[in-house]
Image (cartoon, rainbow, N blue to C red):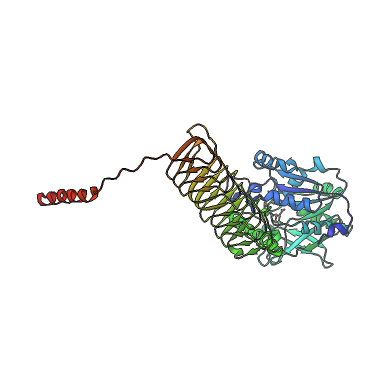
Amino acid sequence: MSELSTTSHPPVAAIILAAGKSTRMKSSVAKPLHTICGDTMASHVIRACREAGVERIVMIVGHQSDVVINALTELGVEFAVQTHQKGTANAVQAAEGLLGDWPGDIITLAADTPLLTAESVRALINLRNSTTAPMAMLTARLDNPTGYGRVIRNEDGTVNRIVEETDASPIEKQCKECNPSLYAFLGEYLWSALKLVGNSNAKGEYYLTDLVEIFSRQQKHVVAKPVEDVDEVLGVNSQQDLATAAAVMRKRLLNRLMAAGTVVVDPASTYIDIDVEVGQDTTIEPFCMLLRGTRIGTGCIIGPYTRIEQSKLGNDVRAIASWISYSTMDDGAKIGPYSQLRPGSHLASGARIGNFVEVKNSTLGPSAQASHLSYIGDALVGAGVNIGAGTITCNYDGYFKHQTVIGDNAFIGSNSTLIAPVSVGAGAFVAAGSPVTGEIPENSLVIARQRASIKEDWARAYRVRKRAEKQQQSTKG
Ligand code: UD1
Ligand code: CA
C-alpha cells in the first residue's frame, strides 16, 4: 500500500489552489470551506498530502482570503495570496516567494478534489521520481469527460499537451482521458517554465496545463498515469457535486468500519464522519448519524434513529432513537428511545435512561436510572438512584444555574420537582409529587404535598345539579 516507503525521494512540497471564486456553488461560503463528512474540502486535501509524506504545504488563496486563512490557520499550512484570479498558472506563481528555491519536488493540486487519497498522492510523487521527467501527472479515463481538460498523448505514450474543453477541437473532445489537475514537478523546472505561459486562449487566462506543451517543445518528457479509482478525482463545483462526493466518502468510511468488524445493517441510511471509531460486534441499526469525534466500544447496539456527536460510549451500550452530544456513556449504560444527552452528561456503567428524558451537564452514577419523562440538568446523581417518572430539576432561576445533588440509592418519587440548589442525602426517600429544596438528610423521608380532602357523594350531587341547569336552559332556548 505504501509505495512511498519503498522509494526514496527528495523532499516534497505541495501547492493547493484555492483562490478561485466558485460561482456554481451559489453560496456565500468560500468553496474550500464547504464540508464533507465533518471536515472542510481543503482540510481533506491537506490530510491526503500529509499522509503521503508531503513536508510543506502552501495554499493559494484569493477570493474571501481572510475567511479562508482564518478557518484553516490551525491546520499549520502556509498561505500565499493570488490578488487577481488570472488562471491556474498565475495561481501557482503566487507561491514562488515561498517555494522559489525548494530543493525537491513540488506537487500542485486543487482544493476542490476532496476525495483524493494519500495513496494517489504517493503514486504521483513516485511517478515523477521514477523518471528524469520534469513533470508527472495523473489522469482519469471518464465516460463523461465534459468540462475537463483532455490529455493528448504522443505515440510513445508521453503527454504532448492538455487542451481545455473550451479550446478543444471536436476530435479532441472525443478523448476520454481527462486532466484531474494533479501534477508533480521538479522544483527547479517549474518556476522557469511558468514564466513562458501565455494567455492566448478562449478564456484569456494563464493555464497551468500549458506547462505540458512547454516541456514537450523543450524535448522534455511529461509522464502520465491513470488513477485507479476515478471517484478520487471528482471535482466539486456545485452543491450536487458536494452531495455526490459526500456519498462516496461515507461509503469508504463505512467500508472501513465493516472491514474491522462493525455490523452496519443499512449502509445507505447510515451517516458517518471522519474521525469516528466503532468497536467489533457493535451493530449500527438503520438511520443513524455518527458525527466527528465519536468513539463507540464493542458489542453495542446503536439505533435505529440515533445521532451521536463528540461522545464516548463504552462496551455493551444501547442507544435507541436518541441524541447524544459531547457526553459519555460507560459500559452497559442504556438510553432511549426518544431521549437526549446534552453536552457534559455522563452515564456511569449500567445507568439507564428511558424514554423522553433530557439530561444536561449531569452525571448519573452506576446503575442509576430515570426511566420516563424527566429533565435532569446540572445534577450529580449517585449510584443506584431511582428517579421517578416526571421528575424535574429546576436548575435555573432566570439568572443563574444551580446544582442538584442526589446521594447514592436515594429514591425520587414520580413528579417531584427538585428546586436547586438542593441536595438529597444518600438513601433518602422523596415522596411522589413533592417540590423539594434545601438539604434533605440521609435516609429520611421528605413529603411536601397537601393531604387530600375527600367529600363523599359530592360528585353524584354535582352531576344532578348540573344536568338540571342544562335542561332548564334548553327549554328556555
Ligand atoms: C482545471 C484544469 C482542467 C482540469 C480541471 C480538473 C486548467 C486551466 N484547467 O479546470 O484541465 O480538467 O481543472 O478539475 O488548469 N484557481 C485559482 N486561481 C485562479 C484560477 C483557479 O486559485 O486564478 C483555483 C480554483 O480555486 C480551483 C482550481 O484552481 O481550486 C481549479 O480552477 P477551476 O477554475 O475550477 O479550473 P477548471 O475549469 O475546473
Ligand atoms: Ca474545478
- Residue 201 place in picture, x, y as percent: 70, 53
Taking the spot 64% from the left edge, 41% from the top edge, the residue there is 64
Quarter of the image where one finds residue 268: bottom right
Does residue 166 appear anywhere in the picture? yes
- Residue 80 place in picture, x, y as percent: 74, 41
* Nearer to us in this view, 113 or 304: 304
Residue at the front extreme?
Answer: 443
- Residue 78 place in picture, x, y as percent: 76, 41
The N terminus - image quarter? bottom right
* Nearer to us in this view, 429 or 422: 429
Q: Is residue 363 left or right of residue 86?
A: left
* Nearer to us in this view, 77 or 79: 77
Does residue 206 appear anywhere in the picture? no
- Residue 326 place in picture, x, y as percent: 61, 46
Taking the spot 48% from the left edge, 49% from the top edge, the residue there is 388
Depicted 327 relative to depicted 400: above or below = below
Taking the spot 79% from the left edge, 64% from the top edge, the residue there is 153
Quarter of the image where one finds residue 253: bottom right
Depicted 221 relative to depicted 13: above or below = below
Depicted 279 relative to depicted 79: above or below = below
